[in-house]
Amino acid sequence: MQYDIDDHPDLKDAAWIRAANRRAKREIRRQRRQARLRRHGGKIVSGIALLVIGAVLFGFYLTGRFDQVSLPDVKLPPTGVNVEVPFASTPAEQWPEGEKGIVVPDANPAYEQVRQALIASRMDPAMLTEHKPDRFLAMLAPEVREHVAKNLPGWTTRLKQGMKLLPGGIRVSGKMTLGEKDGYPAVTADYVFAYAFEPPEPKKLLDQMEMVAAVREQVTYAITPEGLWPSDSKGFQYSISCTAAREGYLAPQFVEPPKPDQGLPGDRRRYFSTDGQMPTENTCE
C-alpha cells in the first residue's frame, strides 16, 4: 500500500512520535560526544600519560629509588654562534692557524720569500688593523711598489675600522708552485685566507658563516735581484660585507646581512678550495 508522507499512519500515532523524538535526541547526544572526543582525544591521552608518569615517579620517590630514574635527554634547538670555536662547522674548521697554513714545499729560498710576502700582506696586524703596508712594500721591487701602494685592496687584507678578529681568528689553506717568468724564478701562490670576526651579539646570529669571511688570492711573484715582482693576480671574496668591500676593506656578513635574494649558489666549500678555477660570481653589484 502506498501513502503520501503526510498521510503515513505512524505520523498520526502520538506514542510513536514521542519514541522517535527520544531516539533522535539520543543520537544527537551520541554524535556530540564523538565530536568532543575527536577534538580533545590527544589532550586526554597526553593527560593520562602525564598522570601515569607522575604516578611512576612518585612511586620511585616513596621507595627511595628516585635517584635511579633516568629522564630523556631533550635537545633544544641551538641559538647563536660558537665564538669559542669560531670556525666550527665551516670548511676552514680543520685548517692550520695563521702562518702555519703557509707551508713551503721545500728549502728553495724563493718559497720563503713569497711566504713572508703572504704573511705581510694578509696576516700582519700592522696591515690588518693599522692599514700600514710598509713591511709588505719593502719586499717588492722598487719599480712596482708605487703601483701596488695605489691598489692595496687588490693585494692586501685590511679590516674595516672597528672590526676585530677573534683569538686564533685566521685560518689558511693553499699551495705554492715554482716556475719561471721573464727569465726569473717565479712562485705562484694560490691560497684561501679565512677570518673569524668578533660579533657584538653572538646570540643573534644564526649561522657561523655570518662572522667568517674568506679571501682567495692567486698571484705569481717573480724573484728578481731587486725584490719580488707580483703579477697575474686574481682574487675573490666570500661571505663579506659588500659595502666594506667597495671601500677597500674586509668585514663579515653580520655588518651587512645579505638580502633574501642575494648569496652565492652551490656548495660553500668550493669558495674555500684552491683545487678549482677562481670563482667569478658577483653578488655585490
Image (spheres, helix red, strand yellow):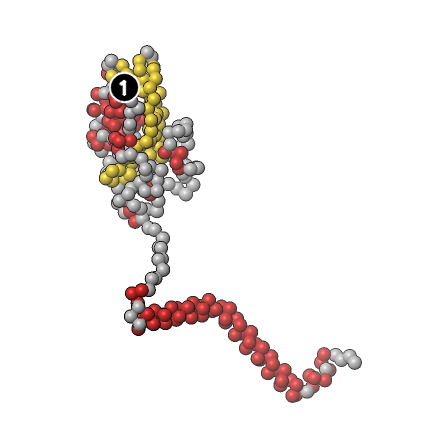
Where does residue 241 sit, x and y in percent of width and height?
33, 37
Q: Is residue 3 visible?
A: yes
Where does residue 10 sit, x and y in percent of width and height?
70, 84
Number of marks present in the image shown? 1
In this orientation, which residue lies closer to the viewer: 181 or 245? 181
Name which residue lies at 29% across and 45% down: 82
User: Which quadrant of the view contains residue 152?
Assistant: top left
Q: Is residue 165 visible?
A: no
**Residue 228, relative to residue 77: is it above or below?**
above
Where does residue 274 sit, x and y in percent of width and height?
37, 29
**Residue 139, relative to residue 236: is it above or below?**
above
Name which residue lies at 25% across and 28% down: 119
User: Which quadrant of the view contains residue 268?
Assistant: top left
SS category of the residue bearing label 1 = loop
The kind of residue tagged 1 is: Asn
| Residue underneath mark 1 | 108
